[in-house]
Image: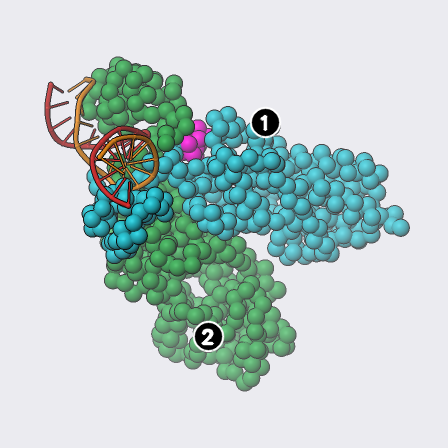
Chain colours: A green, B cyan, C orange, D red
Amino acid sequence: MAIKGRITLRDVAADAGVSVTTASFVLNDQDYAIAVRTQQRVREAAERLGYRPHSNARALATGRTQRLGIVLSSPEVLVSPGAYHAKVLFGIMAAAPLINYNLILHSASYPDWRYLYGDITSGVADGVMLIGRHYNDELTDALLDNHFPTVCVSYNTHHPECISVDCDNAAGINTAVEYLKNLGHRSIGMLIDAYDGIRSWDEERLASFQVSTARAGVRGAAYRVPVEYCGGCGDSGFLRNLLLNDRSETGFIVGSEVLARQVEQIALECGVQVPNELSVISINSTEVSENAVVPITSLWQPLNEIGAAAVNLLNDIISGRGHTNHHIRFEMRLDVRESCAPGPDPY
Amino acid sequence: MAIKGRITLRDVAADAGVSVTTASFVLNDQDYAIAVRTQQRVREAAERLGYRPHSNARALATGRTQRLGIVLSSPEVLVSPGAYHAKVLFGIMAAAPLINYNLILHSASYPDWRYLYGDITSGVADGVMLIGRHYNDELTDALLDNHFPTVCVSYNTHHPECISVDCDNAAGINTAVEYLKNLGHRSIGMLIDAYDGIRSWDEERLASFQVSTARAGVRGAAYRVPVEYCGGCGDSGFLRNLLLNDRSETGFIVGSEVLARQVEQIALECGVQVPNELSVISINSTEVSENAVVPITSLWQPLNEIGAAAVNLLNDIISGRGHTNHHIRFEMRLDVRESCAPGPDPY
DNA sequence: TTGTAAGCGTTATCAG
DNA sequence: CTGATAACGCTTACAA
């Protein structure tokens, strides 16, 4: 079934009085020494007829689609507070056209990862960026096993060929710990959302937290908070107990902004003053932290740069270019706001 | 250049000991009365070899890609306050897979609309959704002129074949006007961002504002505010003058949430109390209005439904199904918050 | 300098 | 019931 009214290369060639080969050569700038007059005729014909190369035909012939796939963990993440994914997507969208790629948004809501796998590897795109998936993600590993060009964004897996782009969680947490220590805090807590599966970023942060607190010579305890991540609501009993019972921690590093706001909120309800009686640092530093009742000091990460880096890295992989660094990390920056105060042991 | 290691239909057919034709029939459920045993052999072979139909080859043969294009006005809109586009995109992303479409995110940053036009019509997708473009958009009209399946989302043009999905701006503004009138306001102002080109939604709102105020028997004046839309900053002289000089308006309907917050902010600075001395209604009703110092009463629109409707409408067009309604409109809802108070003439 | 022709992986027409 | 075979639009050896 012909595509309705499409102008093909044949039409252009006929109009210019040359063969399709010649027309193809000219239009692809593969100047196999074509007479200048012929070139002009071809270009003129293409222009006049409004010729557009057919994306799929070209892809079929060359084996390259000039398209990059994107997989979000779910459609919802696009509209979640802080807009993490939207910001990464922004970086991707800005970077892709610069190196001639279109983007494919793979359906994020397949029941089974195998469908997604089939979709991704159906030849619709030359490679794929997976965003914020689980540590032990079968999809990721299947893709990597089959050497499909893949870049993990904001997470990674244990797969030996895993290539990822993310912020430098380890260094970031260290920054936060040092910051609290220098403020005089001697016992610091880390609060992480309790998900089903473990996330790579949580693991990196927890590991760094242990190392950093030890190195800094302060007490460090990590807690997994059983919160339903539904935008702020959830069971707050855990936090309430944590704050009201005698705790040694005078400062908390909180893995998500929404959770950090909850902490602040519950502290308020419990009569625990932020920052005077409790310092809080969140991670992400978006408007969520900024607009909190007491604006929250937060670790910022360059999400658009992360997106852009993912695009370029994926392009390297597709082009078979050597990528020296399998795990690109971007520095985090501590945005100091008003949620931290000197601890019990200031200099 | 063969696609590396890809299992083709030929491989499956060979493995099952049938022709590609037969294999194709089986795998596409076009049960041209194929022997059940043969079917099983084919399916089994496909499964075992991990066969995936090649997207582009299929597209080339059928003339259908099962992909829908999306054009955002710019990458930035994804991360703008209120996340209008992200929410529409969410609706689109949720709806598309339900009717077996993948999504193409066209590069929103082409210098010239002609490139975009070429991209869109290159056969990469079966149709396109354009989001929030100008009233006199050359791209839109070129697409419509050439009968490329197109749906305008959140805007429309004068093109006779224009098909659009949007909120019902006219009814929404009427709701807001009536609300203020019933509160006792007798002079209402409308504030619109002053862009270069005119936007269809602004035109619809302004027109409705004139009609609605007249019908309600209140005074209605519209102002275009010269604000650089850069997330909250900008020249505020205009608003300051408007608020401080003797004005008759006791209530304003403001076309954007960011602008509405500015109005509130500047009123605060000028010592004009919101809502006691000035009532404000914004449009969009997101966290931007919700988190204002005085939470702003706002007209909400179902952005995800709009996105979903666009997907289904586009599918109808592509399938050649008759679409009775060229301009689908969704009702707006007034989210009452704290920015409106009784006017000078309450009942 | 240009043209012929063989693919790329499907689908679909038409015989057998 | 099944199998050749010709598209689909383009790229690219290879020939002329």
Could you tell me residue B171's position as x and y percent? 71, 41
Which quarter of the picture shows residue A68?
top left
Question: Which one is nearer the viewer's eye here, A203 or A338?
Answer: A203
The amino acid sitting under disc 1 is Pro
Amino acid identity at mark 2? Arg
Q: Secondary structure at mark 1?
A: loop
Q: Position of residue B81 (x, y in %)?
A: 57, 50
Chain ID at mark 2: A
Q: Tell me if I can see residue A316 in this picture.
A: no
* Residue B40 percent coordinates (x, y): 29, 54
Q: In the figure, residue A234 lies in which quadrant? A: bottom right
Q: Is residue B111 magenta?
A: yes
Which residue range is magenta in the image?
B109-121
Give the distance between the C-alpha atoms of the residues marked 2 and 1, in whole angstroms. Answer: 58 Å
Q: Main secondary structure of the magenta part?
A: helix
Q: Are marks 2 and 1 on the same chain?
A: no
Mark 1 nearby-residue class (10 Å; few <14, some 14–19, many ≥20): few
- Identify the mark at residue B160; answer none if there is no mark: 1
The residue carrying mark 2 is A224
**Where does residue B347 sit, x and y in percent of width and height?**
89, 50
Residue at the location (49% across, 40% down)?
A: B315
Q: Residue furthest right?
A: B347
Circles 2 and 1 in contact, beta carbons < 8 Å? no
Residue at 37 percent across and 58 percent down: it is: A113
Q: Residue at x 47, y 26 (%)?
A: B146
Q: Is residue A130 magenta?
A: no
Q: In the image, is A87 to the left or to the right of A66?
A: right
